[in-house]
Amino acid sequence: MTIKVGIIGAGGMLQYHAAGFQKAGAKIIAIADRHTAAAQKAAEKYKVPNVFESVEAMLAGCPELDAVSIIVPNKLHAPLAIQCLKAGKHVFCEKPPALSAREVNEIIAAAKSSGKKVMFNFNNRARPESAAMMKLINNGEVGKINSAQAKWIRRTGIPGFGGWFTTKELSGGGPLIDLLHMVDLAMYFMGYPEPAHVLGQTFNDFIQDKSFKGPWGIADVVGGVTDVENAAHGFITFKSGQVLTLQVSWAEMVKREEVSVVFQGTKAGGKVERLFGSDGLDDTAIDTCELYVQENGKSVNRVIKTPECLDMGRSDSAANFIEAIEGKAAPLNTPEQALRLMQVIDAIYASAQTGRPVSI
């Protein structure tokens, strides 16, 4: 049976969802977007037969849909995921999973009630470097990961001023919730342990400074709201005894953009990194995967060779969703993991606001 997919949102991420779904043999039969011109343009490009102005119209007009992909501003993730799950559709949703852990719990309840799958686009898990590292971890070469450091930092990377990215009511927050990928990847490597205590701080020194705008994103909105952080730092302890340090920023006094997870295990340490050039654009990035071991009394650093992946695993992440529905592959992520991630993010913000550690 060919899985039939409808896509909500005709923005830039659609290209990766479409590529992944088609790679896995699914058929995209509908696109819904209130900006019908954008939806029509995307439909022509990807040969999609149906265009709708609303999700309700798409669900009514294409009852044969098996699955729905959600590519919209963060505030709409949970309500649309719940709506589509209740309509009996599998759901693949862009990150973050929702604005809070409470909303993720509501998504989980809807998924259990409907018996349908819900997955999120934590695409960095699908990068070749991450897959190679996870294979080493699963093979026992790393041992237990005691500690890890997650980093996604930018020097000049604010994605526009006054738009939904910088409006907390719509986005849920700034870089902490936008660039949560490395926090997720670190917890993924660690076995997604249950968080216990969180200490965090956020900073907004540069969030109104136009000189820190990034080379991508959305246009500034005159009179719009900019009320999120430009950087966040945190420390998490887990009930397993493991610990995680995080540093995430759109605008911070660093040399250049870095995207990495470094960890220390009982048998080996390692690093997965995406290091950008001075312009911060993808085509200047270099991906690496390394393992650090002791052999015959000597320190040995292994470089793990992996294929190049220009889209950072985005299309393979979407393909995995289709394969998981069909039972051909294990899902790369689960809603229960998304819940733990959002618990950590909620707690970082709460700790920053109160100035005290937060227990989960």
Image (cartoon, helix red, strand yellow):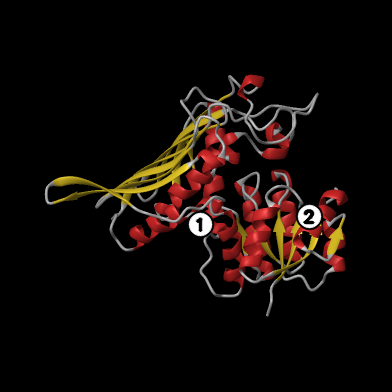
Residue depicted at 52% across the width and 25% down the height? 252
Q: Would you say 300 lies left or right of 72 here? A: left
Q: Residue furthest bottom?
A: 1
Q: Earlier in the sequence, mark 2 or mark 1?
A: 2
Residue at image mark 1: 126
Percent coordinates x, y for residue 281 in the rendering: 57, 37
The mark found on residue 142 in the picture is: none
Residue depicted at 64% across the width and 29% down the height? 228
Percent coordinates x, y for residue 199 in the rendering: 46, 33
Between 219 and 121, the residue placed more toward the observer is 219
Residue 91 position by quadrant: bottom right
What secondary structure is marked by label 1? helix
Q: Identify the amino acid type marked 1.
A: Ala
Circle 2 crowding by C-alpha within 10 Å: few under 14, some 14–19, many from 20: many
Circle 1 crowding by C-alpha within 10 Å: few under 14, some 14–19, many from 20: many
Compared with 119, 167 (above or below) is above
Residue depicted at 33% across the width and 50% down the height? 145
Between 278 and 261, the residue placed more toward the observer is 278
Q: Is residue 194 visible?
A: no
Between 243 and 356, the residue placed more toward the observer is 243
Quadrant (top left/top right/bottom left/bottom right) for the N terminus:
bottom right
What secondary structure is marked by label 2? helix
Residue 315 position by quadrant: bottom right
Q: Identify the amino acid type marked 2.
A: Ala
Q: Would you say 326 lies left or right of 37 here? A: left
Percent coordinates x, y for residue 27 in the rendering: 72, 69
Percent coordinates x, y for residue 127 in the rendering: 49, 54
Q: Is residue 321 visible?
A: yes
Q: Would you say 24 lies left or right of 153 here? A: right
Residue depicted at 56% across the width and 34% down the height? 350
Foreground label between 2 and 1: 2
Residue at image mark 2: 42
